[in-house]
Image (cartoon, rainbow, N blue to C red):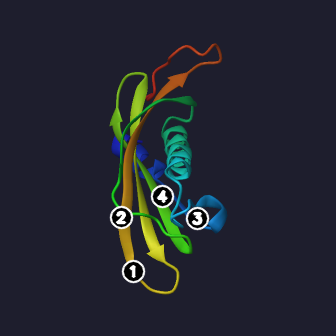
Amino acid sequence: MTVEDKIQASETRIFKAVFPNTTNHYDTLFGGTAMHMMDEVAFITATRFSRQRMVTVSSDRIDFNRPIPAGTIVELIGRVSHIGNTSLKVSVEIYIEQMYSDEREKAVTGEFSFVAIDENKKPVPVFKG
């Protein structure tokens, strides 16, 4: 399997409903909750790509371009964007979908870095080609 095949196969999509218990006093999704969901999707993507123990080492830039209202559906999409020796980066996008229309727009983007580790928590090669 080529690197591009593995990137394609590891792309991760998760849908969630935005309920009132995840929103702030503006009735929009808490930024911290969005970041938590993004890190989870990024972790799943990194693990599906490498099939090894992966740990988050940083979140690079997270841009909140649109508020995410309660009562909407969000789709999180994770895709490997860079592969190093023992690390990789996953870009994550959050799209807002209205529940009762076809309206959809990108709300948040971010990038997360992961390192592959062994059972002793030492870095190991992330891709065996």
Position of 52 with respect to 5 (left or right) is right
Total count of labels: 4
Q: Residues within 10 Å of mark 2 (few under 14, many from 20)?
A: some
In the displayed structure, would residue 55 be above or below residue 103? above
Identify the mark at residue 76; answer none if there is no mark.
4
Element class at badge 2:
strand
* Numbered mark located on residue 106 in the image: 2
Disc 3 to disc 1, C-alpha distance: 16 Å
Residue in the picture at 50% in, 35% down: 50
Identify the residue shown where x is 46% and y is 65%: 68
Residue 129 seen in this snapshot? no
What amino acid type should be assigned to the residue bearing mark 3? Answer: Lys
The residues tagged by marks 3 and 4 sit, at their Cα atoms, a distance apart of 8 Å
Screen quadrant of the N terminus: top left
**Hey, what amino acid is under mark 1?**
Glu
Give the secondary structure at mark 1.
Answer: loop
Q: Residue at x 45, y 28 (%)?
A: 128
Specify the amino acid type for callout 4: Leu
Which mark is first along the chain, 4 or 3?
A: 3
In-image side of 120 versus 83 (left or right)? right
Dot 1 corresponds to which residue? 103
> What crowding class fits label 4: few (fewer than 14 Cα within 10 Å), some (14-19), or many (20 or more)?
many
Residue 50 appears in the rendering: yes
Please name whichever residue, 116 or 102, is drawn nearer the observer in this view of the structure. 102
| 81 up-or-down from 99: above or below | above
